[in-house]
Image: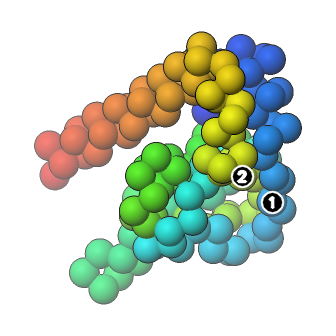
Amino acid sequence: MDKAFEYLNDNDRALLEKKGEVLEVEKDHVILEEGDHRRALFVILEGSCRVVLSLRGKDETVASLTRKEFFGDMNFLEGIGASANVIANEPTRILVITPEKTQALLAADPSLAMRFYHSLAISLSRRLRATTSKLVEE
């Protein structure tokens, strides 16, 4: 889980993992569907996934995610619905973290909360920068 939460220490990660639930899915399983309002953060423990958008009536893979990467961060934060489909490329194990299960933990430890949300912010910033670069290249 290091890559997903680079600003968390080992103890922080262990605490979050205890609050999460492990989901095991088969190849081509749709883990998160566009528009899904489930508020959860998904961390890939083993395996890989693809992020698929329907653009002009055609499904296009817009990102590939591997071990220690996460998705669902915008929905976790805002609860407005997933912006894309996320599909397993192979049998995949995922840690599912929900706000309901982490709220008390983060409220009890403000420094953990700061590191947790800092990691999410950095991830969103990097993804936005990568998307902007792709658009500029096109």
Q: Residue at x 79, y 41 (%)?
A: 19
Question: Mark 1 or mark 2, which has the lower sequence index?
Answer: 1
Q: Which residue is mark 2?
A: 96
Q: x and y percent of residue 125 in the render? A: 35, 32
Q: Is residue 54 above or below residue 40?
A: below
Residue extending farthest bottom: 57
Residue 23 is labelled as 1
Q: x and y percent of residue 43 in the render? A: 67, 45
Q: Residue at x 75, y 34 (%)?
A: 16
- Out of 34 and 19, give the one closest to the viewer: 19
Quadrant in the rendering for residue 45: top right
Disc 1 + disc 2, Cβ < 8 Å:
yes
Q: Amino acid at mark 1?
A: Leu
Classify mark 2: helix, strand or loop: strand
Q: Residues within 10 Å of mark 2 (few under 14, many from 20)?
A: many
Assign the N terminus to one quadrant of the image. Answer: top right
- Out of 76 and 94, give the one closest to the viewer: 76
Q: Amino acid at mark 2?
A: Val
Q: Residue at x 39, y 62 (%)?
A: 80
Q: Residues within 10 Å of mark 1 (few under 14, many from 20)?
A: some
Q: Residue at x 71, y 31 (%)?
A: 105
- Out of 20 and 33, give the one closest to the viewer: 20
Is residue 47 left or right of 6 when viewed as pictured? right
- Out of 64 and 107, give the one closest to the viewer: 107
Q: Is residue 124 above or below residue 73?
A: above
Q: Is residue 3 above or below residue 50?
A: above
- Res. 74 in view: yes
